[in-house]
Image (cartoon, helix red, strand yellow):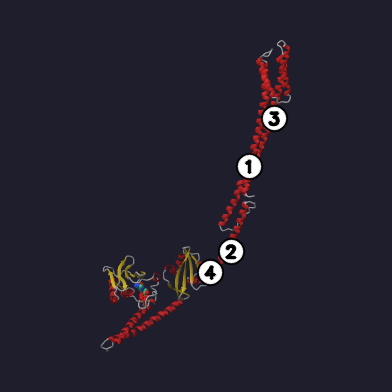
Amino acid sequence: MTIKNKLRAGFGFLFLIAFLCCSLSIFFLNNLSSDASEILKDNYESLKYAKNITSALDESQAGLSQYQISTIENNLRKQEKNVTEPGEQQLTNKLRLEFEHLKVLKTIQIDAELELRSQIRNVLYNIMQLNMNSIEKRNNNAQNTAHRATIIVALIGSFCFLVAFTFVINFPGYIANPIKELTGRIKEISNRNYHQHLNFKTNDEFGELAIAFNLMTGKLNEFEHGNLANILFEKKRIETIINSMHDAIIGFDEKYTIIFANDVACRLLSTNEERLTGKHAHDVAMENDLLRNLLINDHLKMKINTDNREDYYSKEIVPVISNDKVIGKVIILKNITEYQQLDEAKTNFIATISHELKTPISSIKMSLKLLQDARVGAVNSEQKQLIDNIDEDARRLLHITAELLDMAQAETGKIRLNFGSTHPKNIVDYAVKALKFIADQQEITLNIKCDNNLPYVRADLDKTTWVLINLLSNAIKYSRPNTTVDLFVKQNKLDGIEFIVQDHGQGIEDKYLSRIFERYFKVPGASVEQTGTGLGLAIAKDFIEAQSGKIGVSSEIGVGSRFYFILPVS
Ligand code: ADP
């Protein structure tokens, strides 16, 4: 039976018993009251009539007055209508008969009258006795009824009390105990203990609940074990993949606790995984120079000594993002020794070639100078044009070889800096002088703002001028005629002296800005006449950074580009 129906039956039963009790009480009360009213109605009335007749009879000893007769007649008539007891009818008839005799007796018949009066009193006494007996009997009956009613109502009341008491004691437990047990099991489940079973064998809602609950815990158990096995398998697989990689990989959580380090990383850090995992990176870094370097230095390329060998590694820090939140970091060290060696070979090759080319190109230039000199011999206009073209090509070749040499120098870390204390105005003047002619040719106005009161900078004058010339010549190259190129020099409170070259040319798309200082990078789509080797900005960056300076760019398509570099104050 369902709990709902059990509740209905329980409360219904209680109501039924209460109703039965009430009905019985009302029934017995009715019985008692009818007994009492019958006593009143039948016997008490007869006693009253008999008493009235006796009193009327006793008012005179001889003869009856009219008043007496009418009183007796009146009460006798009422008595005749109120005959209730067996034998009462005969006595009433006798009373009527003797009263009629008494009415017709002559006053002189005194003895007969006395006799008759005595007989009437006798009859009245008998009537009263009969009714008195009946009252006594009925009174006894009423007492018996009351006694019986008390016992029955008491019995039923006790029974009701017992039932209600049992109900009150047991019912809350009946509802609360399963709920309590269920709560306990749910708490266990929240602690990931899925081996929970409810044993409600009842055929009601609790029984159904137990079946559903047991089914759910079974599924959860299955899911947990299936999932756990899968997760463990996947973890093993990922660990194997990470371990079999040739790159060193170290994983950290968001609090910089080391989560894993593969075999290569352990070998580089000269330790084992047990001494790394679970430890805070900064604690390990206190004793491990390489890890300290990895965490502190921004360098993306580093030299690491392992097995008495010097290897080059590139460092990449990959943030681990989940739900737009950084939940950790992975440091990947890629062994780039092979590429580094190839790169060095390439740089050496470029350096040798450009160095070797410089001498023949210079002698070509010298020869061209001689050819252009009228004293050597006259040339016709076509020959002159050819000589000018060769001269221009030679100039470009010389420029390219010079850039390649600079780049090779920078790449091998062989930039020779000649530091000195220079006023920014000097650098500006040299650069402007070198470019004035080209700017005029392209109808570009140079707008220069450089305060004489600026402090001196600590810089290599030649290299810094080279950088400024490069930025200005780019600005002129990528500007439309009849526009201005601004060159501002100002003191930057935090970093030093800032040189800004602002053009109003085509601008550079955002996506290329981060690559603009890479070697050989040229913005796609630029015309062949405009672009050069793509080395100028890369060399400029090397030169400025070698002087502990900063270089950067911002640009907007159609509005222009703004290149700047900052050098420390002397
Ligand atoms: P290049 O010798 O090709 O000018 P750079 O390293 O000086 O080499 O410049 C790299 C590339 O950056 C150029 O090819 C050009 O596309 C772009 N660039 C440099 N300066 C500017 C500028 N002021 N406006 C637009 N593009 C520029």
- Residue 536 visible? The answer is no
Residue that carries the numbered disc 3 in the rendered image: 141
Indicate the amino acid at tag 2.
Answer: Gly
Q: Is residue 79 above or below residue 252?
A: above
How far across and how far down the image is residue 148, in percent?
68, 34
Ligand 1 lies under 8 Å from the Cβ of mark 2: no
Residue that carries the numbered disc 1 in the rendered image: 14
Ligand 1 lies under 8 Å from the Cβ of mark 4: no
Q: Nearer the viewer, residue 277 or 110?
A: 110
Q: Is residue 292 above or below residue 91?
A: below
Q: CA distance from mark 2 to mark 3?
A: 85 Å
Ligand 1 resides in the quarter of the picture at bottom left
Q: Nearer the viewer, mark 2 or mark 1?
A: 1
Residue that carries the numbered disc 2 in the rendered image: 226
Indicate the amino acid at tag 1.
Answer: Leu
Element on which disc 2 rests: helix
